[in-house]
Protein backbone atom coordinates (compact mmCIF):
# COMPACT_ATOMS: atom_id res chain seq x y z
CA UNK A 1 0.00 0.00 0.00
CA UNK A 2 2.80 2.40 0.96
CA UNK A 3 4.68 1.59 -2.24
CA UNK A 4 1.58 2.28 -4.29
CA UNK A 5 1.10 5.63 -2.55
CA UNK A 6 4.75 6.58 -3.06
CA UNK A 7 4.80 5.50 -6.69
CA UNK A 8 1.61 7.41 -7.48
CA UNK A 9 2.71 10.63 -5.76
CA UNK A 10 6.33 10.67 -6.95
CA UNK A 11 5.59 11.86 -10.53
CA UNK A 12 3.39 14.64 -9.19
CA UNK A 13 5.99 15.98 -6.77
CA UNK A 14 8.78 15.56 -9.30
CA UNK A 15 6.88 17.60 -11.88
CA UNK A 16 6.07 20.29 -9.30
CA UNK A 17 9.70 20.55 -8.21
CA UNK A 18 10.91 20.56 -11.81
CA UNK A 19 8.45 23.32 -12.77
CA UNK A 20 9.43 25.49 -9.81
CA UNK A 21 13.17 25.01 -10.36
CA UNK A 22 12.79 25.85 -14.07
CA UNK A 23 11.14 29.13 -13.13
CA UNK A 24 13.78 30.00 -10.56
CA UNK A 25 16.74 29.82 -12.86
CA UNK A 26 19.94 28.78 -11.14
CA UNK A 27 19.37 28.86 -7.39
CA UNK A 28 21.19 31.66 -5.60
CA UNK A 29 22.31 33.40 -8.80
CA UNK A 30 20.03 36.42 -8.56
CA UNK A 31 16.51 37.04 -9.84
CA UNK A 32 14.73 34.10 -11.41
CA UNK A 33 12.81 33.76 -14.67
CA UNK A 34 9.38 33.43 -13.02
CA UNK A 35 8.63 37.14 -12.92
CA UNK A 36 9.34 37.59 -9.20
CA UNK A 37 12.74 38.20 -7.73
CA UNK A 38 12.32 35.99 -4.68
CA UNK A 39 13.37 38.67 -2.22
CA UNK A 40 16.23 41.14 -1.93
CA UNK A 41 18.78 38.59 -0.68
CA UNK A 42 18.13 36.20 -3.54
CA UNK A 43 18.08 39.05 -6.05
CA UNK A 44 21.55 40.07 -4.92
CA UNK A 45 22.91 36.60 -5.65
CA UNK A 46 26.27 35.52 -4.28
CA UNK A 47 26.85 33.44 -1.15
CA UNK A 48 23.88 34.87 0.73
CA UNK A 49 21.60 34.19 -2.24
CA UNK A 50 22.82 30.60 -2.45
CA UNK A 51 22.37 30.14 1.30
CA UNK A 52 18.86 31.58 1.16
CA UNK A 53 17.95 29.33 -1.78
CA UNK A 54 19.33 26.27 0.04
CA UNK A 55 17.37 27.12 3.20
CA UNK A 56 14.23 27.61 1.16
CA UNK A 57 14.68 24.25 -0.58
CA UNK A 58 15.30 22.58 2.78
CA UNK A 59 12.14 24.17 4.20
CA UNK A 60 9.96 22.95 1.33
CA UNK A 61 11.45 19.46 1.42
CA UNK A 62 10.69 19.31 5.16
CA UNK A 63 7.11 20.51 4.53
CA UNK A 64 6.69 17.85 1.85
CA UNK A 65 7.97 15.18 4.27
CA UNK A 66 5.50 16.33 6.93
CA UNK A 67 2.61 16.29 4.47
CA UNK A 68 3.47 12.78 3.28
CA UNK A 69 3.77 11.56 6.87
CA UNK A 70 0.36 13.05 7.69
CA UNK A 71 -1.12 11.42 4.58
CA UNK A 72 0.37 8.04 5.52
CA UNK A 73 -1.00 8.38 9.05
CA UNK A 74 -4.44 9.28 7.71
CA UNK A 75 -4.50 6.25 5.41
CA UNK A 76 -3.33 3.98 8.23
CA UNK A 77 -6.19 5.24 10.40
CA UNK A 78 -8.62 4.61 7.54
CA UNK A 79 -7.33 1.05 7.17
CA UNK A 80 -7.78 0.39 10.89
CA UNK A 81 -11.29 1.82 10.79
CA UNK A 82 -12.26 -0.41 7.87
CA UNK A 83 -10.77 -3.49 9.56
CA UNK A 84 -12.89 -2.81 12.64
CA UNK A 85 -15.93 -2.29 10.45
CA UNK A 86 -15.29 -5.63 8.70
CA UNK A 87 -15.07 -7.36 12.09
CA UNK A 88 -18.33 -5.74 13.21
CA UNK A 89 -20.12 -6.77 10.04
CA UNK A 90 -18.74 -10.31 10.31
CA UNK A 91 -20.22 -10.55 13.82
CA UNK A 92 -23.57 -9.36 12.42
CA UNK A 93 -23.42 -12.00 9.69
CA UNK A 94 -22.68 -14.70 12.27
CA UNK A 95 -25.59 -13.47 14.42
CA UNK A 96 -27.99 -13.67 11.49
CA UNK A 97 -26.72 -17.12 10.53
CA UNK A 98 -27.40 -18.21 14.11
CA UNK A 99 -30.97 -16.95 13.86
CA UNK A 100 -31.46 -18.84 10.59
CA UNK A 101 -30.09 -22.05 12.17
CA UNK A 102 -32.46 -21.59 15.11
CA UNK A 103 -35.43 -21.11 12.75
CA UNK A 104 -34.47 -24.25 10.81
CA UNK A 105 -34.12 -26.19 14.07
CA UNK A 106 -37.59 -25.06 15.22
CA UNK A 107 -39.21 -26.47 12.04
Image (cartoon, rainbow, N blue to C red):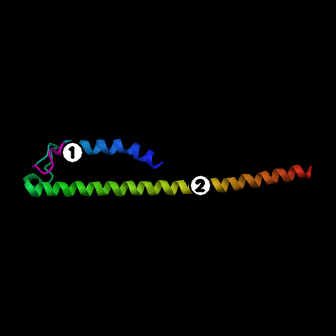
**What main secondary structure does the magenta stretch of the protein show?**
loop
User: Which residue is denoted by mark 1 in the rendering?
Assistant: 21
The answer to whether residue 1 is visible is: yes
Q: Residue at x 48, y 48 (%)?
A: 1
Name the residue at 20% across, 41% down: 22
Whole-percent x, y for residue 32 in the image: 14, 46
User: Element under label 2?
Assistant: helix
Q: Is residue 41 visible?
A: no
Which quarter of the picture shows residue 87?
bottom right
**Left-right relation of 37 to 20:** left
Q: Residues under labels 2 and 1: Cα distance?
A: 42 Å
Percent coordinates x, y for residue 35 in the rendering: 15, 44
Name the image quarter holding residue 68.
Answer: bottom left
Q: Are marks 2 and 1 in contact (CB under 8 Å)?
A: no
In the rendered view, does 43 fall on the left or right side of 61? left
Q: Secondary structure at mark 1?
A: helix
Q: How many marks?
A: 2
- Packing grade of label 2 (10 A; few <14, some 14-19, many >=20) is few
Residue 26 in the image, given as x and y percentages of width and height: 14, 46
- Quadrant housing residue 11: top left
Give me the disc on residue 94. Answer: none
- Image location (x, y in percent) of residue 91: 70, 56
Q: Residue furthest front?
A: 3
Is residue 66 found inside the magenta-colored segment of the image? no
| Magenta span | 23-29
Disc 1 packing (10 Å; few <14; some 14–19; many ≥20): some
Asked if residue 55 lies left or right of residue 5, the reply is left
Residue shown at the point (63%, 53%) measured from the top left: 86
Magenta region includes residue 28: yes
Mark sitting on residue 83: 2
Closer to the chain start, of discs 2 and 1, is: 1
Amino acid sequence: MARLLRSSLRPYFTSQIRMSSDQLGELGKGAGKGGGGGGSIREAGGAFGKKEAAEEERYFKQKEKEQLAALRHHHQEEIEHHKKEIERLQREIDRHKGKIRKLKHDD
